[in-house]
Image (spheres, rainbow, N blue to C red):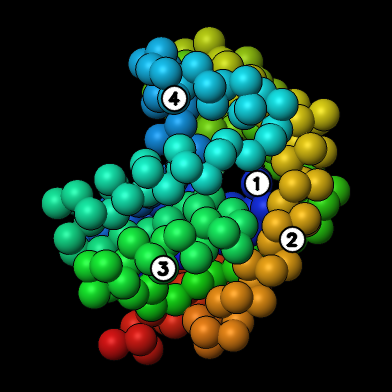
Amino acid sequence: MNIILIGAPGSGKGTQASLLAKEYSIEHISTGDLLRNEVQLGTEVGVLAKVVMDSGGLVGDDIILRMIKDKVLSDSCKGGFILDGFPRSLSQAEGLDKILIGVNRKINKVFNFVVEDEVIIKRIAGRYFCKKCGTVYNRYFNPSCRDGEYCKCGSLEFDSRSDDNEQTVKNRLLLFKEYSDPLVEYYKKKLLLVSVDALKNPSLIFEDIKLIITNLN
Ligand code: AMP
């Protein structure tokens, strides 16, 4: 089973992708995570990507499609995969189709996470995480214990992504709007698209998605 989750940054795709990957024992591929890993390792790709990511722009298709191809064709994806944060544009969707056709595989469903801008900005600009255990919190919706004093693991040290600030979020949202309509249309025409109300409680969203996946078989 191969699934795509599309939606604005902060729409909750990442949370659902992790839950679904665990539920169905399939690989969770987040291009954002793959790029952050390159940045951390200080690779050539990482150095190039960091500048773009910090400005809220989109990393070039050549880099992204190469990373996706390596990952999708690797053994870890033999049982299926969930794409989170990719494709972000029509050209990436077409590039993905070429990769999949080459190995006689296809996308089974595309879930489109729909949510308003104001919520997105608060979700992203308020996001921070525990440096020790990685638990993600939100200053507005889900603060750590005693209003950000300490994490449930006891740690007092928190951090946030360098691109999770209000200005970068606005750029990321603008780009998302520019590229998402053709992408949504592309998958609608292929009869693969399902809309998800991303304002709903994450556990309810998870149940809705599972029901649709069950009916795929
Ligand atoms: P994310 O973790 O999905 O919010 O991605 C963080 C940043 O990584 C984005 O703002 C982009 O700069 C870059 N990025 C992630 N996925 C892609 C993609 N599919 N195409 C281009 N850039 C990407």
Contact between marks 1 and 2 (CB within 8 A): the answer is: yes
How far, Cα to Cα, is label 3 from label 4? 23 Å
Of circles 1 and 3, the one toward us is 3
Mark 1 residue element: loop
Vertical relation: 102 (above or below) 29: below
Residue at the (77%, 56%) spot, across then down = 177
Q: Residues at badges 2 and 3 in contact (C-beta under 8 Å)?
A: no
Residue on which disc 4 sits: 45
Mark in front: 2 vs 4: 4
Residue at 75%, 47% in the rendered image = 175
The residue indicated by pointer 3 is 97
Q: Is residue 5 visible?
A: no
Amino acid on which disc 4 is placed: Val
Count residues near mark 1 (Cα–Cα under 10 Å), then give few for <14, some for 14-19, many for 20+.
many
Q: Which badge, 3 or 4, comes first in the chain's sequence?
A: 4
- Residue at which label 1 appears: 10
Image x and y of residue 185, in percent = 66, 76
- Horizontally, is 56 left or right of 154 in the view? right
Q: Earlier in the sequence, mark 4 or mark 1?
A: 1
N-terminal-most mark, 2 or 3: 3
Q: For the point 47% across and 42% down, which residue is it? A: 62
Residue on which the image places disc 2:
115
